[in-house]
Image: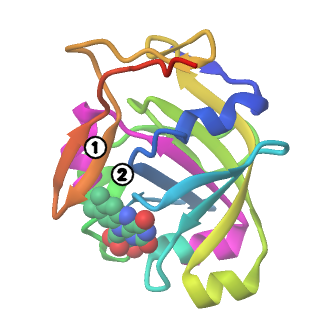
Amino acid sequence: MRIPVPLDHAPRLLNHGPVTLVGTARGDERNVMAAAWVMPIDFTPPKFAAVVAADTKTRELLLATGECTLMAPTDAMLDVTYAVGTHSGRDGDKFARYGLAGERGSVVAAPLIAGCACWLECVRVPEPHVEQAYDLFVLECVAAWADDALWQRGEWQFAAGGPRTIHHLKGGLFFLTGDRRQAQR
Ligand SMILES: Cc1cc2nc3c(=O)[nH]c(=O)nc-3n(C[C@H](O)[C@H](O)[C@H](O)COP(=O)(O)O)c2cc1C
């Protein structure tokens, strides 16, 4: 079940560096792409940096609307994550093509795609220089959600054999988020 996450915990959702999906919407048009180069950069308000390449449909919609969603897919979504990361929405509706279901966010119109481990609703903080020079977008998180089967007591609880978030190595090769270790002082 999708449950709200307090904004001060939002950076923890992507602290472990999983591959994300970036959702965008403009009117009736929706799109999603894979993005591995996404990271938290601030706590209050929570902000993230995301590389969104110049030739993507996602960038066109993000610039047009100033909004997007960041989501962490689970390993059950590995193939579709790769598919939306290797095909452009310019060539057709990826939601229809890959059977994705999603509802609009609570604050932004961009989609929250079913089956993900977490969902962050974001607005663009315009930084034209870094956008143009590095394809890097600063995104402020205005609402956050997580799957309560995986997120409890303010942290991820990935169980052996259960759904986990994914990390991209190269060319469609991924590994799954691994074991926990607590550092000792
Ligand atoms: C695992 C994976 C990670 C990716 N990470 C990024 C990324 O961080 N930034 C980016 O601009 N593109 C990244 N891509 C490529 C985009 O997802 C790809 O260009 C996509 O087709 C763009 O779709 P769109 O044109 O519908 O927006 C990644 C692709 C894969 C498969």
Furthest residue toward right: 44
Q: Is 118 positioned to the left or the right of 19 in the image?
A: right
On the image, the x and y values in percent for residue 15 come to 54, 40
Q: Which quadrant of the view contains residue 125?
A: bottom right
Ligand 1 shows up in which quadrant of the image?
bottom left
Kind of residue at disc 1: Gly
Q: Magenta: predominant secondary structure element?
A: helix
Furthest residue toward front: 185
Q: Residues within 10 Å of mark 1 (few under 14, many from 20)?
A: few
Residue 161 visible in rendering: yes
Q: How far apart are the two marked residues, 1 and 2, measured between alpha carbons?
A: 6 Å
Q: Is 148 positioned to the left or the right of 27 in the image?
A: left
Kind of residue at disc 2: Phe
Residue beneath the point at 44% across and 11% down = 149
Residue beneath the point at 31% across and 40% down = 166
Q: Is residue 60 above or below residue 47?
A: below
Q: Is mark 2 within 8 Å of ligand 1?
A: no
Q: Which residues are magenta?
A: 60-82
Q: Which residue is mark 2?
A: 95
On the image, the x and y values in percent for residue 73 come to 37, 39
Q: Residues within 10 Å of mark 2 (few under 14, many from 20)?
A: some
Q: Is residue 62 magenta?
A: yes
Residue 122 is tagged as: none
Q: Is residue 123 magenta?
A: no
Question: Would you say the residues marked 1 and 2 are in contact, meaning their CB atoms lie under 8 Å apart?
Answer: yes
Q: Is residue 120 above or below residue 180?
A: below
Q: Secondary structure at mark 2?
A: helix
On the image, the x and y values in percent for residue 86 come to 25, 67
Q: Which residue is mark 1?
A: 99
Residue 28 visible in rendering: no
